[in-house]
Image (tube, helix red, strand yellow):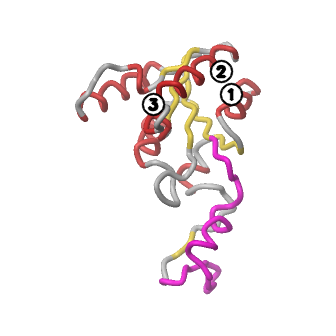
Amino acid sequence: MKLYLAGPDVFRPDALAWADAARAQVAVAGHQALVPLDNEESTAAGIYRANLALIAEADAVLANLNPFRGLEPDSGTCFEVGYALALGKRVVAYLADARPQAEKLLAPLGPFSERDGRLYDRTGWGVEHFGLPVNLMLGASCTVVEGDLGQALAALNAA
């Protein structure tokens, strides 16, 4: 299968080395990696179109949903996941900490209060509490595994 690798890994200081290692890991699992760094575009519009083309070409998407520059996954990765799902692609997402989202948010946003069966942070905003490790729009639509690219590949191959 052709697998699009979505995630903020393209921003790593060692992005090219990461891409080479990821391609090799995917190949060992019997698949071909499609990496956003593979295109030669340099403008925002060009990169956008090239990434959409790679997702369309892919049989499935493996998405790194680890928090990026905050408490939530990378917004570009979330867009790519949604686009892939809209095209009917299977998405396997991975993150290092698969505890329920509310549990992970307690330290930075708590203490929580509860009323009417809902949780609220200290500023009064609601906190999603469905036992999923990410927002329900990601957690209910994707296969989510705890771990890294290797665990995502294993979950994809097990299905």
User: Where is 46 relative to 133, above or below?
Assistant: above
| Of the image marks 1 and 3, the number of the one nearer the N terminus | 3
Give whichever of 63, 22 is nearer the camera. 22
- The answer to whether mark 2 and mark 1 are in CB contact below 8 A is yes
Q: Is residue 49 above or below residue 112?
A: above
Look at the image and say whether residue 149 sits in the magenta stretch: no
Residue 144: x %, y % from top left: 66, 43
Query: What's the mark number on residue 25?
Result: 2
Q: Which mark is residue 153?
A: 1
Image quarter (top left, top right, bottom left or bottom right) of the C terminus: top right
Whether residue 135 sits left or right of residue 145 in the image: it is left
Q: Position of residue 101 (x, y in %)?
A: 63, 62
N-term mark: 2 or 1: 2
What mark, if any, has residue 26 been given in the picture? none
- Seen at 62% across and 17% down, the residue is 24
Query: Which segment did they paint magenta?
Result: 94-123
According to the image, label 3 marks what residue? Answer: 87
Q: Looking at this view, is 88 or 25 the one in front?
A: 25
Spatial CA distance of label 2 from label 3 is 25 Å
Nearer the viewer's eye, disc 2 or disc 3?
2
Q: Amino acid at mark 1?
A: Leu
